[in-house]
């Protein structure tokens, strides 16, 4: 009986390529959303809830809330976007557009200065 044989190495490579393309498409979607939805007179980023981004992301990719959060966290960990926690959901920025005063290092510096004032 003549069946189709598959090269496992090729399938893994094609799967990896498809995954990379999907991630690139995700970043392209997020970048386009930030640029289209932001009001630069107020901020260079967007609030994921108030801008409608969350709903659009989930509809575009067919994800639930958890999958969308994991995807955004992965982009942030890769340095593709910056997430800054805010009430009701994070603000998302492109790298270089995020306010500098909200970085972890800046917050640590501010905490040190505040402690010095309190403790003398």
Image (tube, helix red, strand yellow):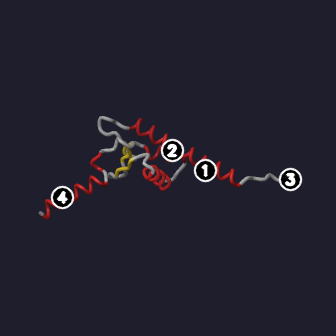
Q: Residue furthest front?
A: 9
Q: Residue at x 56, y 47 (%)?
A: 20
- For residue 2, the mark is 3
Q: What residue is disc 4 on?
A: 114
Cα distance between the residues tagged 3 and 2: 40 Å
Front position among marks 3 and 1: 1
Say which element carries label 1.
Answer: helix
From mark 4 to mark 1, how far is it between C-alphas? 48 Å
Query: Which quadrant is home to the N terminus?
Result: bottom right
Q: Distance from label 4 to label 3 (Cα)?
A: 75 Å
Mark 2 nearby-residue class (10 Å; few <14, some 14–19, many ≥20): some
Q: Kindly identify which numbered label has been placed on residue 26.
A: 2
Q: Earlier in the sequence, mark 4 or mark 2?
A: 2
Q: Earlier in the sequence, mark 4 or mark 1?
A: 1
Within 10 Å of the Cα at label 4, are there few (<14), some (14-19), or many (20+) other Cα atoms?
A: few
Q: Viewer-proximal residue, 54 or 105?
A: 105
């Amino acid at each position: 009986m003549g069946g189709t044989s598959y090269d496992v190495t090729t399938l893994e490579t094609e799967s990896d390529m498809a995954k990379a393309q999907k991630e690139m498409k995700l970043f392209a979607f997020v970048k386009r959303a930030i640029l289209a939805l932001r009001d630069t007179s107020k901020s260079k980023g967007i609030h994921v809830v108030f801008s409608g981004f969350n709903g659009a992301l989930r509809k575009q990719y067919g994800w639930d809330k958890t999958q969308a959060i994991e995807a955004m966290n992965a982009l942030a960990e890769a340095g593709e976007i910056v997430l800054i926690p805010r009430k009701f959901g994070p603000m998302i920025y492109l790298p270089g557009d995020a306010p500098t005063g909200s970085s972890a290092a800046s917050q640590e510096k501010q905490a040190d200065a505040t402690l010095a004032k309190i403790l003398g």
